[in-house]
Amino acid sequence: MKRSISYAQFQAQNRLLHLALLVGQMAIGVVFAVLGGQNADGPPSPELNELFVPLVPLTGLALVAGAIIAFRMLLSRASQKPSLADKLSTYRTALVTRWAIVEVAVLFALVAFFLTANTLFLYCAVAAVAIFAFFHPWPGRAETDLNLSQTEIDQLANVQTPTRGR
């Protein structure tokens, strides 16, 4: 069963989802920072550290670049949708996809820090969280990202975006 929500609710849900993901990353980061390096089997492996030193920053950069590319690809698909509701639905998919890819970079850096106790990886995680925070769904951003016409912007007050019902 599908139900509809207003554009204001759509924006509020996107902001809430982003905030929840951001808080989750920060909470995991705090836990890993407190527990990092407390390996019960002894000190962290130097070989593992050597492997992660180039891998974590390069993977993080590649994932952020991939998130931006995937977002733009999905935006181009959204602009081809016939209805405004379909455009907004595809826009949410693009947002969640971008956030998920950047979150992988955060979690990968945090796991590397947890396994090696190398603070470089903690700094990489903080940088990825900052990038994630930069991708906040600001008011008016959907209109700009989707390159909506003035007619479509005027329709936003009345559009009902489909969502999944329970």
Image (tube, rainbow, N blue to C red):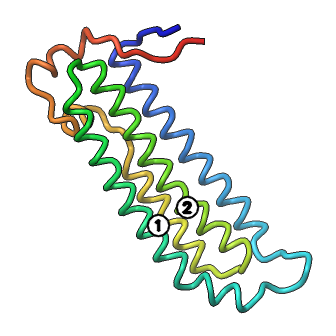
Q: Is residue 13 left or right of residue 56?
A: left
Q: CA distance from mark 2 to mark 1?
A: 8 Å
**Residue 137 location, quadrant:** top left
Q: How many marks?
A: 2
Amino acid type of disc 2?
Val
In terms of depth relative to the viewer, which is nearer, 118 or 160?
160
Give the mark nearest the N terminus, 2 or 1: 2
On residue 106, the disc is: 2
Question: In the picture shown, does residue 119 fall above or below 4?
Answer: below
Q: Secondary structure at mark 2?
A: helix
Question: In the picture shown, does residue 50 fall above or below 14?
Answer: below
Mark 1 crowd level (few <14, some 14–19, many ≥20, 10 Å Cα)? some
Question: In the picture shown, does residue 158 fall above or below 130?
Answer: above
Q: Is residue 35 left or right of residue 154?
A: right
Amino acid type of disc 1?
Ala
Q: Residue 62 location, x and y as percent?
A: 41, 68
Q: Residue 150 location, x and y as percent?
A: 8, 23
User: Which residue is at the far left?
Assistant: 150
Q: Secondary structure at mark 1?
A: helix
Q: Is residue 84 left or right of residue 135?
A: left
Q: Which residue is mark 1?
A: 127
Q: Residue 129 location, x and y as percent?
A: 49, 58
Mark 2 crowd level (few <14, some 14–19, many ≥20, 10 Å Cα)? many
- Seen at 44% across and 59% down, the residue is 130
Question: In the picture shown, does residue 64 fall above or below 4?
Answer: below
Between circles 2 and 1, the one closer to the viewer is: 2
Q: Residue 114 location, x and y as percent?
A: 72, 71
